[in-house]
Amino acid sequence: MPTDDNEGLQKIDRQYSQIRVDKVLMFIGKLQLYRQALTIRKAA
């Protein structure tokens, strides 16, 4: 397997894992906002 191909695959893999991390972080952020809204509603 040529090294050029391998490097290309690694770059693609890195981009995909970065997208995955971003989506997870966004999901966690939404969960935290949702929990905050719930606690505010309970306190009110």
Image: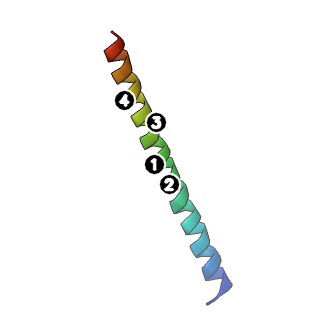
* Numbered badge on residue 8: none
Left or right, residue 3 beside residue 12 = right
Residues packed near mark 3 inside 10 Å, few (<14), some (14 to 19) or many (20 plus): few
* Lower position in the chain sequence, tag 2 or tag 3: 2
Residue 40's place in the image compared with 15, above or below, is: above
Which residue occupies the foreground of this view, 12 or 32? Answer: 32
Q: How is the image coloured?
A: rainbow
Task: Name which residue type carries label 2.
Answer: Ile
Residue located beneath label 2 in the image? 19
Where disc 1 sits, the SS reads helix
Which of labels 4 and 1 is toward the front?
Answer: 4
Residue drawn at 55 percent across, 67 percent down: 13
Residue drawn at 50 percent across, 48 percent down: 22
Residue located beneath label 1 in the image? 23
Where disc 3 sits, the SS reads helix
Left or right, residue 8 beside residue 35 = right
Residue located beneath label 4 in the image? 34
Task: Name which residue type carries label 3.
Answer: Gly
Which of labels 2 and 4 is toward the front?
Answer: 4
Q: Position of residue 43 (x, y in %)?
A: 36, 12
* Lower position in the chain sequence, tag 3 or tag 4: 3
Residues packed near mark 1 inside 10 Å, few (<14), some (14 to 19) or many (20 plus): few
